[in-house]
Amino acid sequence: MSVLVVDDCPAARESLRALLEARGYRPVLSAASADEALAVLEREGPGERGRSGVEVVLMDVEMPGMDGIQTCARLKADERLRDIPVLIVTGNTMESALEAAFTAGACDYIAKPVQPSELLARLRSALNLKQQIDSCKARENDLIQVTSRLEQANAELQRLAVLDELTGVANRRFFNLVLAQEWARAAREVQPLALAMIDIDFFKGFNDQYGHPLGDECLRRVAAALSEAARRPGDHVARYGGEEFAVIMPHTGPQGAAAVAERLRRRVEGLTPLHAPSPAAHGVTISLGVACAVPERGSSPDLIISAADRAVYQAKHEGRNRVVLFEVLPECGLPLPRGLRPHQTA
């Protein structure tokens, strides 16, 4: 372990070097001034886990230029060097002088003339202190790394908890949460909210003929197409279940919702077929049921879900690959059939 001896007296430096090396301390570095000491420390750095460096400094107080106490204060102000223990070597053991040394950051002092037994005892104590500091810092760094990994893992778990594993869009759980939040906000702000429920046409026949792997690929491609088409800030695409998807459109009235839904329909219809034409399907198309409402305070988002479900049922009944829009009229309230007005875009 490396010790740095700082003293402007060559004889004193050599005496301390010889004593320390005889007791197994190697290498013993030396400096004749504060500037030399700072240069050595800058070059060697502190001894840390996994690397060599200066483990402790023996600093004479009386030196030309910057004295030992000022130099000690400089070391303690440097974040990289502040943990190196500094033993002040002084002939002035008055309380005021020692208080100044400890205030500057010295961990101990050695009175002149230096007694070998006292020097070695205080040096061992300083080195034990350095090892404890290094151990604490190592544990702290380990803890920081573990905490960082846990935070990353928790963030990934939270992300996965709201994503559909197959398609990569939001899952049903996230859909329910966002719809409830947007419904409540729309009620507070008296703003329209739109919801599109989307069903892939003839998906069961497609799955039966081409198998689940191609069916899964179809779901992934439809999800990607919907995500690309629902590009407005605030729109949320989710997999509702099976071959059903949903798009939540905050601050969107009937006209805007119909335009977004038609863009979604065209985007999916334009996908490159995954298969050769067959009786099951010539390409991928979707039926969309869109519902719009200005929610009333205390009402349930089930209103708009039921309306969108009825609209998608009508779209399928009328021939599929189309958009049907229902507007929930708040003055009619429940039941839902009396609160719906159908619109259609082919």
Image (cartoon, grey):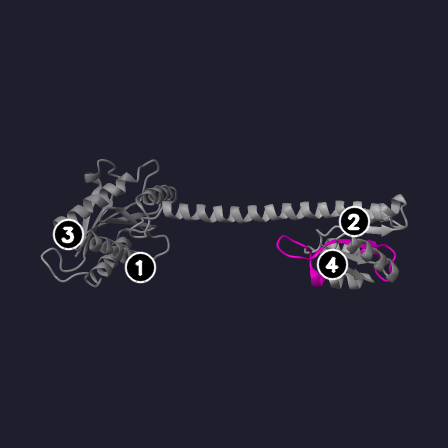
* SS label for mark 1: helix
Spatial CA distance of label 1 from label 2 is 64 Å
Q: Amino acid at mark 3?
A: Phe
Q: Residues within 10 Å of mark 4 (few under 14, many from 20)?
A: some
Q: Residues within 10 Å of mark 3 (few under 14, many from 20)?
A: some
Q: Nearer the viewer, residue 285 or 7?
A: 7
Nearer the observer, disc 1 or disc 2?
Answer: 2
* Three-letter amino acid code of the residue under disc 1: Glu
In the image, what residue type sits under mark 4? Pro
- Give, as a three-letter code, the residue at label 2: Ala
Look at the image and give the residue range highlighted in magenta.
Answer: 41-70
**Looking at the image, is mark 4 or mark 2 nearer the viewer?**
4
Read off the residue under disc 2: 106
- Whole-number angstrom distance, CA of label 1 to CA of label 3: 23 Å
Name the residue tied to disc 1: 228
Q: Is any part of residue 253 visible from this angle? A: yes
Query: Which quadrant, please, contains the N terminus?
Result: bottom right
In the image, which disc is placed on residue 27?
Answer: 4
- Please name which of the two marks, 1 or 3, marks the residue nearer to the observer: 3
The image quarter containing residue 303 is top left
Dot 1 or dot 4, earlier in sequence: 4
Q: CA distance from mark 1 to mark 4?
A: 66 Å
The mark nearer the N terminus, 1 or 3, is 3
Q: CA distance from mark 3 to mark 4?
A: 81 Å
